[in-house]
Image: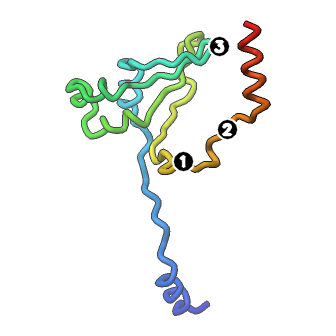
Amino acid sequence: MRLGNHRRNAAKYPPIVVPFTAPPSAALINAILEHADIRHDLGDGRALLRISQARAAKRDMRQLLGRETPRLKDISILWDDDEDEMIRVCDDAGAEAPEDVSDDDTFELTEAALAYIADFQARR
């Protein structure tokens, strides 16, 4: 094995750096459990708990979490009301919204579909 080639290849192909985001702390999870103001009922006794941006911007949340406060927008908790326990902590850190919506992401109704909808509405 020749080390010279390794060094030459390392210069050609720089390492891929992936930003690391620490997992949510216990304080962050507790803050969501205690102060969640967004609740999406998912059915079957389960709900998704979050803290809104307006609630996260309040002084008491900033005092409670300090530098971790911006992470509130990334964290949600799947909660089971029947068992009164957490099912999963969902962390969306690093998830990015698509920059551009292409034409492939949209659709148009055909003439047959439009006729079907019009016929259905006329029967009502």
Q: Which mark is residue 101?
A: 1
Q: Mark 2 = which residue?
A: 108
Q: Nearer the viewer, mark 2 or mark 1?
A: 2
- Judged from this view, the residue extending furthest toward the top is 124
- For mark 1, give the secondary structure: loop
- Which of the two discs, 3 and 2, labels the residue nearer the N terminus? 3
Q: Amino acid at mark 1?
A: Val
Give the residue displayed 36% in from the left and 38% down from the top.
71
Rounded to the nearest angstrom, the CA distance separating label 1 from label 3 is 34 Å
Percent across and percent down for residue 55 are 30, 23
Task: Using the rendered image of the protein, determine whether residue 95 is visible from the camera's viewpoint.
Answer: no
Q: Amino acid at mark 2?
A: Glu
Task: Using the rendered image of the protein, determine whether residue 123 is visible from the camera's viewpoint.
Answer: yes
Q: Which mark is residue 44?
A: 3
Rounded to the nearest angstrom, the CA distance separating label 2 from label 1 is 15 Å
Note whether 77 is above or below 23 in the view shown.
above
Residue 32: which quarter of the image? top left
Give the residue displayed 43% in from the left and 56% down from the top.
19
- Which of the two discs, 2 and 1, labels the residue nearer the N terminus? 1
Task: Answer few, some or many: residues within 10 Å of disc 2's Cα (few below 14, many 20 plus, some between 14 and 19).
Answer: few
